[in-house]
Image: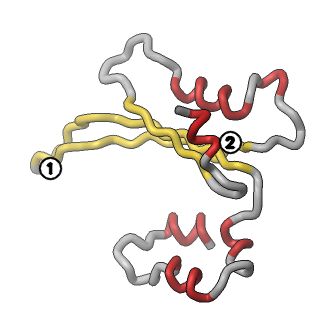
Amino acid sequence: MIGTGMESVGPGRALAVTYYLPDEWSRSTPVESIVVRTVLGNPSHRIEQPEWEFFGNLGIRLCLGTGAARQVRREMGVVILRRVGPKPYQRRHQVDQSTIDASTLPALHPVFTRDVANNVW
């Protein structure tokens, strides 16, 4: 599935792989390692001008709120890699105004966050 995902990602775009983390501390498949090694290659053979670059990773906890407490129901991991190419903010000068208007998110919109502002602008 990683290879199929890589094929569909254009220059400057990101590939995000999500996976569930195990519920208990035990041996498990090292998904993050497999994804990074599949996309970037073996660390000892990586080239200086790669086609892909590591972008980030994060963990997500899906919680159930019960009063003042919370109970973790599931945990997920996300690995993000980016195909080398123009950054999103650089491409804004290469598209027509209707595309920019359709992609604009008003700063007062509920999903607009500091994270969006810092990572998109």
Query: Residue 93 or 7: which is nearer the viewer?
Result: 7
Q: Amino acid at mark 1?
A: Ala
Crowd class of label 1 (few under 14; some 14 to 19; many from 20; radius 10 Å): few
Q: Write down the quadrant of residue 26 in the picture.
A: top left
Query: Residue 50 or 117: which is nearer the viewer?
Result: 50
Tell me which residue sits at (83%, 21%) in the image.
44
The outermost residue toward the right is 48
Q: Position of residue 33 (x, y in %)?
A: 60, 25
- The tag earlier along the polypeptide, 2 or 1, is 2
> What is the secondary structure assignment of the residue under circle 1?
loop
**Residue 96 sits above or below residue 16 on the image:** below
Crowd class of label 2 (few under 14; some 14 to 19; many from 20; radius 10 Å): some
The outermost residue toward the left is 67
Q: Write down the quadrant of residue 69 in the picture.
A: top left
**In-image side of 85 versus 19 (left or right):** right
The circle on residue 54 is 2
